[in-house]
Image (tube, grey):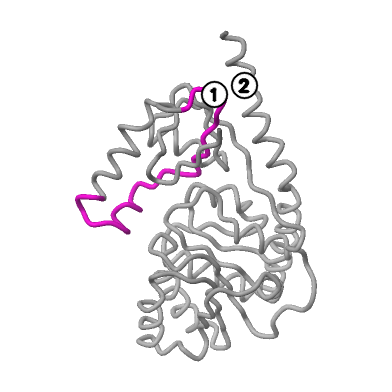
Amino acid sequence: LVEIWNGMPWLSPLWASGPRICFLHHHHAEMWDMTLPPRLARMGRLVESRIAPPFYRRTPIVTLSESSRRELVEEMGFKAKRITVVPPGVGARFSPGGEKSPTPLVVAAGRLVPVKRYDYLIDVLVETKRRHPALEAVIVGEGYKREELEAQRHQAGAEAWIRLPGRIGDEELVDLYRRAWVVAGAAAREGWGMTLTEAAACGTPAVGTRIAGHLDAIAESASGMLVASRDEFVSALDAVLRDGGLRERLAAGALEHATRFTWEATALGTLEVLAADAIRRRGRR
């Protein structure tokens, strides 16, 4: 059995007796307050952080990154030895090709939901625009925050240069990654940061928030830059957009970093953890 614990667990140890693993990508923490009324948010935090973890003390946990493993140990009380890191892969369609945009282009992709903090990113982009008047940006994705983001864009007078195209096809997304000068990730929580690695495979460096997940999705100063504040975000984007040599070095590092991740390795790593649990259980009979 493979359980995916995404905020609220399925509590499979209480009803599944056979071999099992649990995918737990990250601790949701403040995400509860971003998405639910206060009482429900408190309940969610309590279940996720305190009530549920003890039930999983004999269940192998799989997470995506070393930084996420540290987070699960420090914030949820899991034993490090019970957690296996299996990074995600990158699809073969994400590859370099074509020409970069002739003008500075920042791309971001993901669900338009609070944890992705696209409102924060729009503020960063508006400030960056003051330093780079030719800047354009595309935020790809759908979600219930779309109307608020459109209103924020309008209020900032940014409708002419920040696009919100919604959901797009894979080919168009790959083309955007390839044309972008840099990809941006402003999330508050991530298990990894798939869009950053997909863009890296297309030869595009990243600037992302310094959070668990991003710490592994971005090879700091090699494939991109990690930031801890809005001012740092603006400064990092400014540096990458302004310095062609830096951009080329980070692009080369991004390509190298992305080659480390394949779905074949992800599948093998996952099956090894499940097989090990099956063998352990058979030995107890």
Q: Which mark is residue 278?
A: 2
* Picture layout, residue 256 above or below residue 278: below
Q: Position of residue 62 (x, y in %)?
A: 55, 35
Amino acid beneath label 2: Ala
Q: Quadrant of the N terminus?
A: top right
SS class, disc 2:
helix
Would residue 28 be counted in the magenta stretch? yes
Foreground of the two, 155 or 268: 268
| Contact check, label 2 and label 1, Cβ < 8 Å | yes
Q: With 33 as the anchor, is 194 left or right in this view?
A: right
Q: Which class describes the residues within 10 Å of circle 2: few (<14), some (14-19), or many (20+)?
A: some
Q: Residue at x 40, y 82 (%)?
A: 150
Would residue 273 be counted in the magenta stretch? no
SS class, disc 1:
loop
Q: Residue at x 69, y 76 (%)?
A: 179
Determine which residue is flagged by label 1: 18
Q: Quadrant of the C terminus?
A: top right
